[in-house]
């Protein structure tokens, strides 16, 4: 009897440890956009209150991947479809704090609490029909990403940055960032409220550049063509910027390959 009891206790203990390990992985295997601050980051910092659970775990906005064809349903996109984080879907009358931006390059920073194998980071932005006082739906967004950074299964650093070229907009909008995990069926969702200042290309906080437009490094190169083959050192221009190829490539669009990708941005033109 005693031996059987010990076996049962051992099995129970092992099961408890397994559950604890699983819960720990779930608690730490996440990430969120911290600059510009996402809604979850604003809740965690205390700048926005009455947020519920997300105040304690801003990294946990995880939902099914496959957006926009799949993923969270309309009205639950910012929470990743998680009921405990429903406060993120509440538009609060359009009064979420906003970050001032302008059309042009903008740096986005992710804070990671674990390094998942990564497929892509995708960025979307709202269109002219967007109403900040209503929950986010697919009809509010351009469903083609304005930027996509492929990592081919590699693990991100604990801090990740992407340079995203924001299109021209006026007034208050929302940027949706989606971190698609390579080896699970899930993704992480971050909603960032922004206000376009209309100040022209570049972020208002960026220092002035001394390079005259159109005369920067590589601006005299020919335009990128999807069908052309480029080798390491090849220079092209694309959508108002100059790029240099790091290795052989064909069909990979400059500005979409990320900081570890083939194309390195060298100048605004």
Image (tube, rainbow, N blue to C red):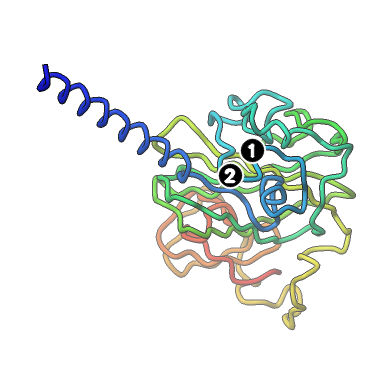
Q: Nearer the viewer, residue 25 or 212?
A: 25
Residue tagged by mark 2? 57
Q: In which quarter of the image is the C terminus?
A: bottom right
SS at mark 2 in the image: loop
Q: Is residue 69 above or below residue 181?
A: above
Marks 2/1: CA–CA distance: 7 Å
Name the spot of residue 230 as percent of width and height, x first. 46, 59
Q: Residue at x 73, y 29 (%)?
A: 138
Q: Which residue is drawn at 54% across and 48% down?
A: 31
Q: Position of residue 57 (x, y in %)?
A: 58, 44
Hey, which residue is sitting farthest top in the picture? Answer: 1
Q: What element carries label 1?
A: helix
Seen at 89% across and 49% down, the residue is 171
Which residue is at the far front? 2
- 66 over 253 or under it: above or below: above
How many neighbours does mark 1 have within 10 angstroms: few (below 14), some (14-19), or many (20 or more)?
Answer: some
Task: Give the x, y percent position of residue 81.
Answer: 63, 27
Residue ID for mark 1: 53
């Amino acid at each position: 009897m005693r031996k059987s009891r010990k076996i049962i206790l051992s099995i129970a203990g092992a099961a408890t440890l397994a559950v604890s390990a699983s819960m720990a992985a779930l608690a730490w295997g996440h990430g969120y956009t911290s600059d510009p601050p996402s809604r979850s980051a604003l809740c965690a910092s205390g700048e926005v209150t009455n947020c519920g659970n997300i105040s304690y775990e801003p990294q946990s906005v995880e939902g099914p991947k496959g957006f926009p064809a799949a993923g969270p349903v309309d009205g639950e996109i910012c929470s990743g479809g998680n009921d405990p984080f429903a406060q993120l879907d509440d538009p609060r009358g359009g009064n979420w704090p906003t970050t001032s931006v302008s059309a042009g390059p903008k740096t986005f920073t992710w804070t990671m609490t674990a390094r998942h194998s990564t497929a892509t980071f995708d960025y979307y932005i709202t269109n002219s029909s967007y109403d900040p006082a209503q929950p986010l739906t697919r009809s509010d967004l351009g469903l083609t990403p304005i930027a996509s950074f492929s990592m081919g299964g590699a693990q991100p650093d604990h801090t990740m940055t992407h340079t995203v070229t924001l299109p021209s907009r006026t007034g208050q909008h929302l940027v949706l960032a989606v971190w698609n995990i390579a080896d699970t069926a899930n993704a992480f969702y971050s909603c960032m409220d922004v206000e376009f200042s209309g100040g022209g290309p570049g972020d208002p906080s960026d220092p002035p550049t001394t390079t005259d437009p159109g005369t920067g490094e590589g601006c005299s190169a020919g335009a990128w063509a999807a069908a052309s083959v480029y080798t390491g050192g090849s220079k092209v221009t694309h959508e108002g910027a100059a790029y240099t190829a790091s290795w052989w490539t064909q069909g990979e669009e400059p500005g979409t390959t990320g900081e570890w990708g083939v194309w390195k941005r060298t100048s605004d033109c």
